[in-house]
Amino acid sequence: MKKTDVQETKVTIKKVTIKHQFKHAIKIALLASYMALALTACASVAKKPENIDDKVITTSLVGAWVAEPDDKKALPGISNYLKNGRLEYVGFRTKQCTDPQVLVKADWRVQNGVLIIVVQDSTNHAWYPPGMIVEDKVLDINDDHLILENSEGELEYRVRSEACLTEKAR
């Protein structure tokens, strides 16, 4: 074997190694690109409810809403959102909604996807003092269902109804 043959072999091996590394780098880059696209797609789906127009939320909110029966965070009650920006809320002692516990008069508006309620008066100032502000992020709304995120990051589920529900509507 000549000395030049060995050198040529080494060069060939280096070319193969570089070619292999290049292919490997391309595979990694493509995989990273696919993952980035997938994450972007997931993020855009997750962000979609946040992009609901305030006017759409406002129009959709008008009417009566009640808490889902299994929503342990909410007092059973009926919230009636009026077109003029007023809110009338009746809270009941039990899920049967036969014994009113509190009546609340408030103003409401939607700003940057957040439902803002300002209590004007109530029959129980310990629970709902005048001036109390409640801000809930609207995550999703349609003709029948409303999903809110309260200031503690907990989800609250509402159903369009003029009467309390005793069975889960979701």
Image (cartoon, rainbow, N blue to C red):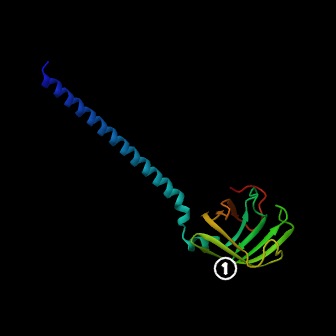
Q: Please tell me which residue is depicted at 73% across the width and 59% down the height of the picture.
A: 68
> Residue 105: which quarter of the image?
bottom right
Q: Please tell me which residue is depicted at 61% across the width and 70% down the height of the picture.
A: 114
Side of 53 where 87 appears, left or right: right
The residue that disc 1 covers is 85
Give coordinates of residue 30: x percent, y percent. Answer: 36, 45
Instruction: In the rendered view, tell whether residue 169 sits above or below residue 55.
Output: above
Q: Label 1: state its secondary structure.
A: loop
Instruction: In the rendered view, tell whether residue 135 sits above or below residue 71.
Output: below
Q: Label 1 sits on what residue type? A: Gly
Give coordinates of residue 95: x percent, y percent. Answer: 82, 61
Q: Please tell me which residue is depicted at 77% across the width and 60% down the height of the picture.
A: 165
In the picture, which quadrant includes the C terminus? bottom right
Q: Please tell me which residue is depicted at 19% across the width and 31% down the height of the picture.
A: 11
Give coordinates of residue 36: x percent, y percent. Answer: 43, 51
Number of labels in the image equals 1
Give coordinates of residue 40: x percent, y percent. Answer: 46, 54
> Residue 167: which quarter of the image?
bottom right
Direction top: furthest residue? 1
> Residue 60: which quarter of the image?
bottom right
Side of 25 where 158 appears, left or right: right
